[in-house]
Image: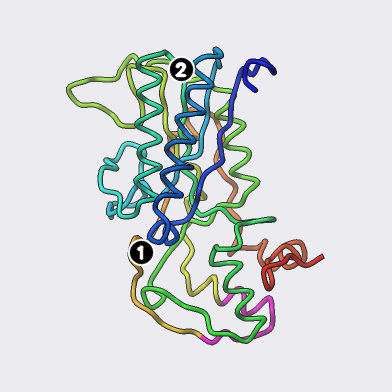
Amino acid sequence: MFSESGVERVVHLAAQAGVRYSLENPHAYVDSNLVGFVNVLEGCRHNNVQHLAYASSSSVYGSNRTVPFSVHHNVDHPISLYAATKKANELMAHTYSHLFGLPTTGLRFFTVYGPWGRPDMALFLFTDAILSGRPIDVFNNGQMRRDFTYVDDIVEGVIRVLDRTPVPDADWQATSPDPASSSSPYRVYNIGNNEPVELMHLIETLEKCRGMTAEKNMMPMQPGDVPETHADIDDLERDTGFRPRPRSRMAWVGSSSGIVSITVGGKREA
């Protein structure tokens, strides 16, 4: 495909996603996220691709509790296999940047929501349960915050970054290495909203826009999960001029377009 179409830039977003599913099916994550990713790297390497931008994840921050999460923070302590595969993607990309001069940019997405979102995400699971009269599982007894990021902002961030091919960082020091850049053509960025939302507020928003009250099943923190995500997007704004637009209290969820896009019973409403 690479050689036939003369591809110059590549955006790689395919992956086996999800923290909890990785506990049940680890081999699916190895096959898709590791083997699949090295295939993309090889395709780029052998066909003179000028820039590879790929999806990483906020999950790489793992057990880090310093917020907001910065690309300059250490991410050597993942707490799920999914997170480990995304961290491995960043390491593999850096290796190809170093060995073969392939410019690569990793994009750490923070809890993407919006039209055609993943049906295993809380927004869709909660809505389906509320409409069906089933209880919703509220982990960590509701003491969780997520940096929900609207899909349009994710797309804008990807496009901005794709137009900015990384070059070696002249200020990078091997004696105090910055994980966000390199002496090779390599970068990583956070793409998040920079405004975490309380989980209970999300539930209240869903209840309000549907005119129903959720039956809540309070549960402890689940393995591989974290209490909070919060993106530091200063580097993204500095290098691309783009900063995701704040969206007041998950406004899309209560809009007509949001309501008809939410998964109900495994299908999307017309």
207 part of magenta stretch: yes
Q: Give the structural element (helix, strand or loop) at label 1.
A: loop
Q: CA distance from mark 2 to mark 1?
A: 36 Å
Which kind of residue does numbered mark 1 sit on? Pro
Q: Rate crowding at label 1 as few (under 14), some (14 to 19) or many (20 or more) other CA atoms within 10 Å.
A: some
Residue positioned 52% across, 28% down in the render = 40
Query: Residue 135: x, y in percent?
Result: 53, 84
In the rendered image, the vertical position of residue 256 relative to residue 166, given as above or below: below
Q: Rate crowding at label 2 as few (under 14), some (14 to 19) or many (20 or more) other CA atoms within 10 Å.
A: many
Which coloring applies here?
rainbow
Determine whether label 2 and label 1 are within 8 Å by CB: no
Query: Residue 77: x, y in percent?
Result: 25, 48
Q: Which residue is mark 1?
A: 227
Q: Which residues are magenta?
A: 204-215
| Quarter of the figure that contains the N terminus | top right
In the rendered image, the vertical position of residue 146 relative to residue 150, given as above or below: below
Q: Nearer the viewer, residue 9 or 43?
A: 43
Residue positioned 32% across, 36% down in the render = 72
Which kind of residue does numbered mark 2 sit on? Leu
Residue 102: assigned label: 2
41 part of magenta stretch: no
Tell which circle, 2 or 1, labels the residue nearer the N-terminal end. Answer: 2
Q: Give the structural element (helix, strand or loop) at label 2.
A: loop
